[in-house]
Amino acid sequence: MSKRREFLIKAGLAAGAFSVNSMFNKVHASDFSALDRNYGHIAPKVLAEDEDFWSVIQQAYPVSRNIINLNNGGVSPCPKVVAEAVEKYNVLSNEGPSYFMWRILDMGREPLRNKLATLAGCDSEEIAINRNATEALNTVVFGLNLKAGEEVIGTKLDYPNMINAWKQRSTREGIIYTQLDFSFPTEDDDMIVSAFEKAITPKTRVLHITHVINWMGQILPVKKICDMARKHGLKTLVDGAHSFGLLDFKIPDLGCDYFGTSLHKFLSAPIGSGMLWIKRENIEHIWPLVCNDKPTGGDIRKFETLGTRSFPIEQGIGEAINFHEAIGSKRKEERIRYLKNYWAEKASEIKGVKIHTSLKDEYSCAICGVSVEGLTASDLEQKLFNDHKIHTVPINWENVNCVRVTPHVYTRKKDLDVFVKALQNIAGKA
């Protein structure tokens, strides 16, 4: 063991993301300690407006200044220290892949599981590490023991990969897939909960709930829906792709049975990283998406039989959690919500501009939809990029037609001022 530890030290692995000598601690510890000394007494909602505090965090992101990236809802950039961790361990892996990956870096998964569990507020034996929310949620969708004629209820505004997964089960196996139709934004929790409850039939077994609707940022009252579902004896699957690492919550407090998320969005982990949470007593009842020798066992690791995978990414996830925790979950949520409201409130005063998202705290955080009268979403997106080098994404899904705008902690207020002026210019011409 002493020789092995000596080797790990020489390889730089004893200073990995899960140790006190992590890259984050080496690069950022002193700066973040100073921030805490100077700003630790300030409430997160007040601190959200302090540009001096957030400028330190902005500098940690190596983002391009050739464009203004306001599409962080798709995938977010990593802090420099996260990207460097992945690069460092990729280089090491290539020096002897089967040895350094399987015998050395693979030792990082259990510390990462523990770190994710602490962040999620749950038992580490309920966390599986994978590649994204689609993989996590599909594991549950296809792993549930449902028979022909049994029903799942979701909405038309769920993520397409989830909708298609349920449709595939419906086509192939004869389960009933019912989709509710909502018109968002709304500030009426009771209406949403009631719509789900009224749709329940004796055949209903599962409710599929999207925590934050990706199209325009509506936050659903997940806990209220899950509490209602439990009274009816139903299981609940929550799509947390746009909530984990953004909103300040613990997964078990939602009251759901299953939860899947991507870590490369608001947690700013490496691209291609995700997490699945399954309530412990439910693990044995879910079949793994990829084969395992104990498919009906109760070990959460049965969902990680993925074959060859990127071990350096797991070190990167660890560094992303270090960075996230140094900021503070509530501080991060309040800052990103402040940035969203900063531009949206100004844009709402422009003639011909429409905001498609509630600006109340309970109903939105980062994502907000905007449109300009006389232009399609695609037209507006193209004008923003071609004329102003502002990157957004056009949304044309069901009854949602807008451009989705999503800032992150690295986003500068002056970039949002440029965006608002761009909207003024475009609306004036339209």
Image: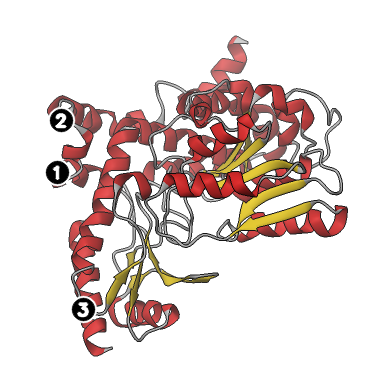
Few, some or many residues within 10 Å of mark 3 (<14, 14–19, 20+): few
Circle 1 — which element?
A: loop
Dot 2 or dot 1: first in sequence order is 2
Query: Which amino acid, by three-letter code, is at mark 1?
Result: Asp
Quadrant containing the C terminus is bottom left
Q: Residue at x 38, y 56 (%)?
A: 367
The residue positioned 56% from the left and 16% from the top of the image is 5
Q: CA distance from mark 2 to mark 1?
A: 10 Å
The amino acid at mark 3 is Lys
Whether residue 242 appears in this view of the structure is: no
CB contact under 8 Å: marks 2 and 1: yes
Circles 1 and 3, Cβ within 8 Å, touching? The answer is no
Q: Earlier in the sequence, mark 1 or mark 3?
A: 1
**Residue located beneath label 3 in the image:** 351
Residue 229 visible here? yes
State the residue position of label 1: 50
Closer to the eye: label 1 or 3:
3
Q: Nearer the viewer, residue 92 or 59?
A: 59
In the rendered image, residue 141, in percent from the top left (x then y), is placed at 72, 45
Residue count near mark 1 (Cα–Cα under 10 Å), binned few <14, some 14–19, many ≥20: few
Q: Mark 3 or mark 2, which is nearer to you?
A: 3
Residue at x-position 77% and y-position 26% = 284
Quadrant for the N terminus, please.
top right
Relative to residue 53, is residue 5 drawn left or right?
right
The circle drawn on residue 42 is 2
